[in-house]
């Protein structure tokens, strides 16, 4: 459901999201504040809570005067809403929706903003060997994530729908900045890339406003500055346990990194009495079920978002290849043992994860 500009709808959305503060998002990361060693009040952050991409977001900034912080907050909110309004596949009046309606009829010229997201998505598809594919829309609809349904699709339906999936079926004209679908019924959905792209946009805005110490949470996708808050060596970021409600797998110290988690523990449908997760393999047309959760720590928001989804589908083999190609990248894979406890595997460049059991909100 898209965010509208009406005050009543926005208030309802904020109330709904606030009531479950970061407990109904794909991943939950919390900045740990140790009360016994809390920094002085003058070093406390200024915070902004806002709703975009249909989730609650929070920005914390340190060492900025109040007036400068308010200017930053307003500009960040404005630009992220412009991005949301451009690439929202569920809003009929968005530029992406217009492209989805018309690109199989004739080439559609894109705005610079939409074109840049498309080029990022194409690069993500290439580096993931097709595991990440924004043309997944028809499969999401087939499996009931756009409309309610009670029965699983047949194999014939899956095979027919897969003919409408694949970025190799999309023709990009870089000179004209236009897009053409070679197969009718194709649909682009940026759900797996939007928050990561938005994190990178946000960090550019933060730099323009001299906000050099920050923590940004876009519905569970995290960016933290290279400089930690006063009196601290690093941000302590909690990574959610995909096997337990409202609990952390552990925490790790991070600086200048981006974090994302993918899993089927939040967004799923019950079809034929079975839980079906929303992460689809675009090559098989089936939900990916091998893993319970994948967390990624890397050097950009876009990579964190894309890699968490791609590795959930391509598993450890793809993760190892991505770590070799992209220095500063690490993966945390979570599966379930026979006692319903998490089995954790680490791949790549990661700081130590301090394992813990307990609530996800640490104070």
Image (cartoon, rainbow, N blue to C red):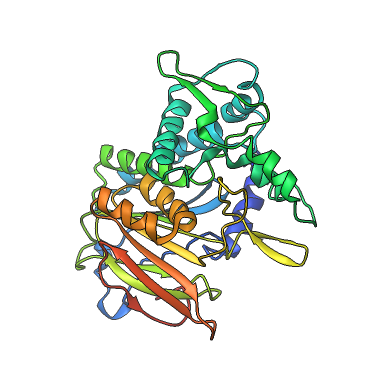
For residue 341, side relative to residue 40 (left or right): right
Rendering coords of residue 134 (x, y %): 53, 39
- Can residue 284 be seen by looking at this rendering? yes
Of all residues, the one furthest to the bottom in this rendering is 339
Q: Which residue is drawn at 40% across and 37% down?
A: 75
State which quadrant residue 276 falls in. bottom right
User: Which quarter of the rendering shows the C terminus?
Assistant: bottom left
State which quadrant residue 15 falls in. bottom right
Rendering coords of residue 325 (x, y %): 27, 48
Q: Is 89 in front, or is 228?
A: 89
Q: Which residue is drawn at 19% across and 68% down?
A: 231
Q: Residue at x 46, y 39 (%)?
A: 80
For residue 215, side relative to residue 229 (left or right): right
For residue 117, side relative to residue 226 (left or right): right
Rendering coords of residue 351 (x, y %): 25, 67
Q: Is residue 33 above or below residue 307?
A: below
Of all residues, the one furthest to the right in this rendering is 150
Q: Is residue 112 above or below residue 140?
A: above
Q: Which residue is drawn at 46% across and 46% down?
A: 195
For residue 104, side relative to residue 27 (left or right): right
Rendering coords of residue 27 (x, y %): 48, 62
- Can residue 214 be seen by looking at this rendering? no
Q: How many marks?
A: 0
Q: Is 17 in front, or is 193?
A: 193
User: Which quarter of the rendering shows the N terminus?
Assistant: top right
Q: Is residue 318 above or below residue 31?
A: above
């Amino acid at each position: 459901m898209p965010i509208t500009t009406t005050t009543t709808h926005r208030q309802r959305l904020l109330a709904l999201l606030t009531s479950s503060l970061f407990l109904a998002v794909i991943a939950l990361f919390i900045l740990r504040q140790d009360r016994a060693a809390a920094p002085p009040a003058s070093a406390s952050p200024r915070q902004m809570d806002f709703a975009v991409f249909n989730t609650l977001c929070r920005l914390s900034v340190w060492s900025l005067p109040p007036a400068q912080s308010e200017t930053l907050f307003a500009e960040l909110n404005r630009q992220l809403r412009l991005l949301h309004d451009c690439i929202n596949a569920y809003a009929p009046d968005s530029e992406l929706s217009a492209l989805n309606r018309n690109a199989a009829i004739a080439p559609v010229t894109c705005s610079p903003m939409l074109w840049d997201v498309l080029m990022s998505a194409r690069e993500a598809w290439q580096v993931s060997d097709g595991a990440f594919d924004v043309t997944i829309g028809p499969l999401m609809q087939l499996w009931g994530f756009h409309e309610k349904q009670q029965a699983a699709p047949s194999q014939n339906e899956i095979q027919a729908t897969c003919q409408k999936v694949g970025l190799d079926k999309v023709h990009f004209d870089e000179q004209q900045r236009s897009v053409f679908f070679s197969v009718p019924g194709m649909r682009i959905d940026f759900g797996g890339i939007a928050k990561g792209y938005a994190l990178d946009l946000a960090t550019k805005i933060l730099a323009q406003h001299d906000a050099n110490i920050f923590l940004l949470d876009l519905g569970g996708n995290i960016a933290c500055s290279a400089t930690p808050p006063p009196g601290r060596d690093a941000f302590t970021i909690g990574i959610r346990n995909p096997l337990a409600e409202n609990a952390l797998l552990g925490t790790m110290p991070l600086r200048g990194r981006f974090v994302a988690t993918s899993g089927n523990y939040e967004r799923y449908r019950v079809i034929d009495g079975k839980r079906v997760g929303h992460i689809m393999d675009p090559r098989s047309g089936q939900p990916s079920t091998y893993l319970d959760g994948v967390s990624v720590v890397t050097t950009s928001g876009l990579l964190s978002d894309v890699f968490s989804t791609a590795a959930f589908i391509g598993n450890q083999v793809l993760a190892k290849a991505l770590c070799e190609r992209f220095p500063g990248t690490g993966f945390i894979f979570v599966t379930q043992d026979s006692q319903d406890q998490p089995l954790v595997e680490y791949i790549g460049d990661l700081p130590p994860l301090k394992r813990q059991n307990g609530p996800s909100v640490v104070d």
